[in-house]
Image (cartoon, rainbow, N blue to C red):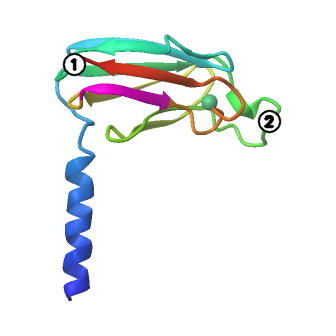
Amino acid sequence: MRDMKVLLLLLVSVFVFSCTQTEEKPDLVVNIGVSKDGYKPNDITVSRGQVILFKITALDDGISAGFGNQNVGHCFYILPPYDVMVKNIKKGQTKEIKVKMIYPGDFVFTCPYCSGIFPTNGVIHVR
Ligand SMILES: [Cu+2]
């Protein structure tokens, strides 16, 4: 029973502290293209507290084209503390995510699928 309470508390903490994804109205739309050449743009500056609607468009198949069997597409992952991810953006697709930029600083975003092979990394500066 005590273990269950600890587990529950842990789950609640994880939810509360990773709560940067939002359904609030966006202050700004940021369009990003992703391909084997990386993200364009890969250097983004936003204001702290803003709600950003990121629209990520995959311009190619990423690792799926010759590097793997499955068509997984690309990914848009902002590392913790933001810890938000848009998965499986396939060639020609645009996927969206709204993020409240509550943490100031410089945060890396990446494609966990292909950043080991392609330069799919970028930085978001929250000022
Ligand atoms: Cu990728």
Q: Secondary structure at mark 1?
A: loop
Q: Which residue is mark 1?
A: 26
User: What residue is shown at x 23% (from left), y 48% (from top)?
Assistant: 17
93 above or below 82? Answer: above
| Left or right of residue 59: residue 109 | left
Please name the amino acid that badge 2 sits on: Phe
Query: Magenta segment: does it hold 83?
Result: no
Q: Name the image quarter holding residue 47.
A: top left
Magenta segment, principal secondary structure? strand
| First of labels 2, 1 by sequence position | 1
Label number found at residue 67: 2
Q: Judge by depth and name the residue closer to the eye, 95 or 51.
A: 51
* Residue 13, x across and y down, in percent: 21, 58
Q: Quadrant of the C terminus?
A: top left
In the image as oriented, which residue stretches furthest toward the right?
A: 66
Query: What range is drawn magenta here?
Result: 104-109
Nearest the eye: 40 or 56: 40
Quadrant (top left/top right/bottom left/bottom right) for the N terminus:
bottom left
What's the distance in space between the residues labelled 2 and 1, CA to CA? 36 Å
Q: Residue furthest bottom?
A: 1
Res. 1 mark: none
Front residue of 11 and 108: 108
Residue type for callout 1 = Pro
Ligand 1, what quadrant? Answer: top right
Residue 19 locus on image (x, y percent): 23, 43
